[in-house]
Amino acid sequence: MKVKLPKTVASPQDLSALILEIKEYAKWYAHEAIKLRFATSKATNNGPVLSAGASEMIRTWFGNKEPNRLGFDGLIKTLEQYAKSSQLVTVTLAAPAPNSLKATLVEWFRNNVSPDILVSFQINSTLLGGMVVRLGSRVFDWSFRRQIIDAKDTFPEVLRRV
């Protein structure tokens, strides 16, 4: 089954955290199922608190079916395979980006490059502004630093006019 990651899962680190969270929940769920099978009264433990992304992923994976250990194993294996096979793009910015900008960039990459892409963000203050995008072996440099270096012959003239 093909998975579609929640919007909150953008980077490889987010995906690893999601996998760990689902593994912990699957472990808890298996223990609760055993307790319910042999207990004389209903269990009262509500279980671990899941993030919105993990809850959405589990709901989507199981649909209307009752979760089970094999289903959780399949989900975890699928997510691990997704992590290995998905394309990675690295966006380097001059300063930390607000979450709204990150969400916009992730949405753009998923709509225009690949719906399965993972986006990693880095910071490099020497860029002075703009961004550098690495996709596979290709590098797209839209930084102010690159523009200044490219215009090194005309830059002194610009400064003289200021």
Image: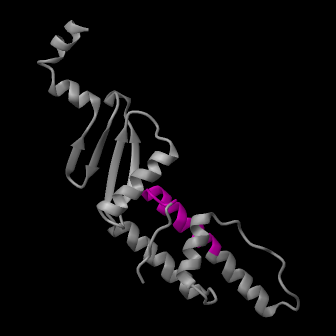
154 relative position to 23: left or right: left
List x then y, in percent, for residue 22.
58, 71
Point out the stretch of residues depicted in magenta.
8-25
Q: Residue at x 40, y 46 (%)?
A: 121
Residue nearest the viewer, comparing 156 with 132: 156
Residue nearest the viewer, comparing 58 with 144: 144
List x then y, in percent, for residue 124.
37, 34
Which quarter of the figure is the N terminus placed in? bottom left
Q: Is residue 76 above or below residue 67?
A: above
List x then y, in percent, for residue 157.
15, 11
Is 20 included in the stretch rendered in magenta? yes
Residue nearest the viewer, comparing 150 with 32: 150
Q: In this view, does 151 lie above or below 59?
A: above
Protein image colouring: one colour
156 relative position to 18: left or right: left
- For this orientation, the residue located farthest to the left is 153
Q: Residue at x 20, y 14 (%)?
A: 158
Is 135 included in the stretch rendered in magenta? no
